[in-house]
Amino acid sequence: MGTGPPPVASAPDPAVVQAMADSRERVLATIAEAAARSGRPPADVTLVAVSKTVPPDRLRAATAAGLQLFGENRVQEAAAKVAEVPGARWHLVGPLQSNKARRAVELFEAIESVDSVAIARRLDRLARETEPGRRLSVYLQVNVDDDPSKAGFAPHDLEGNLPDLLGLAGLRIAGLMTIGRLVSDPEQARPTFLALRELSSRLRSAHRGLEPGLSMGMSDDYPVAVEEGATVVRVGRALFGERPSLAAPGHG
Ligand SMILES: *Cc1c(COP(=O)(O)O)cnc(C)c1O
């Protein structure tokens, strides 16, 4: 087709948009039912569509279907996608290395995975430096189950660090985040979610400035998380389908 400039991204396939709209509706209905069981309006819960491994063309279909807030777990992957998906907003949900913090501050509306005072300080400095007056929204990741394989503040460490964290003028501490244990029955994740909610309310009664956000729940357990008070759920596979297995032959 000639030698002109490359075409702008073509309009998304209507069948793909419809399929995305259907899964969005399904997940939102499940959230609304779980919220009702905990006596809350559905609007209390924000759906973050976790889009890791999902290519930009499908994400454009997702935005056409009404999903606008995406979660990525790697800064580099997000950096490659953000410009390709106009109108989307992005949260970082995966671990952040300090050498990627500057890029992260540029790309993300919120960092849900702040797991150390050092990274919080760096984000604070970068947020104030790049946009005076900005308060970057962050969630403090808590390793509720004291799982050695997981990132996050140990619950007993968080309280001691909280005054320092709340003093960082470039950050808005929107709440706490946790990743539930890998369990076969979603009910088994409930104690983790309950513990995060109780930790949040205990800390908030003693420390002004910690906001009540609770980011918890993924595809397998988000209804339970919403019942236990989640204000943010991070849902990938229930919206986009199974991810390609990293262990698949030929990967990389
Ligand atoms: C991948 C991921 C999710 C979403 O997981 P699904 O099981 O696909 O819903 C949520 N949170 C974090 C931190 C993730 O890395």
Image: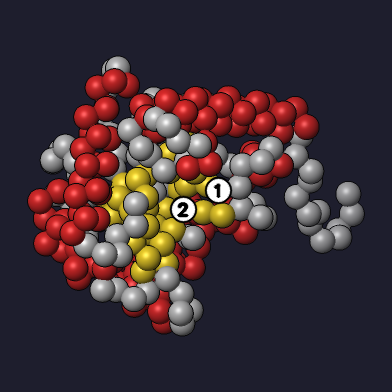
| Residue denoted by label 2 | 91
Q: Residues within 10 Å of mark 2 (few under 14, many from 20)?
A: many
How far is the residue under mark 2 from the one under mark 1?
7 Å
For the residue marked with disc 1, what is the amino acid?
Answer: Leu
Mark 1 crowdedness (10 Å alpha carbons): few <14, some 14-19, many ≥20: some
Please indicate whether residue 17 sits to the left or right of residue 119 in the image: right
Q: What residue does disc 1 label? A: 69
Secondary element at image label 2: strand
Q: Position of residue 100 (x, y in %)?
A: 37, 64
The residue at 81%/54% (across/down) is 7
The C terminus lies in quadrant? top left
Considering depth in this image, is 75 or 210 the residue closer to the camera? Answer: 210
Residue nearest the observer in this picture, 34 or 248: 34
The residue tagged with tag 1: helix, strand or loop? Answer: strand
Contact between labelled residues 1 and 2, with CB atoms less than 8 Å apart: yes
- Left or right, 146 with respect to 81, comes to left
At label 2, the amino acid type is His
**Which residue extends farthest right?**
2
Q: Is residue 105 visible?
A: yes
Q: Observer-nearest residue: 140 or 118? A: 140
Q: Which residue is depicted at the point 34% across and 76% down?
A: 169
Extreme-top residue of the structure:
185
Query: Does residue 109 sit above or below 125 in this rendering?
Result: above
- Give the residue at x 52% y 30%: 32
Disc 1 Cβ-to-ligand 1 distance below 8 Å = no
Asked whether residue 48 is in view, the answer is no
First in sequence: mark 2 or mark 1? 1
x and y percentages locating residue 13 in the rendered image: 76, 34
* In the depicted structure, whether residue 167 falls above or below residue 57: below
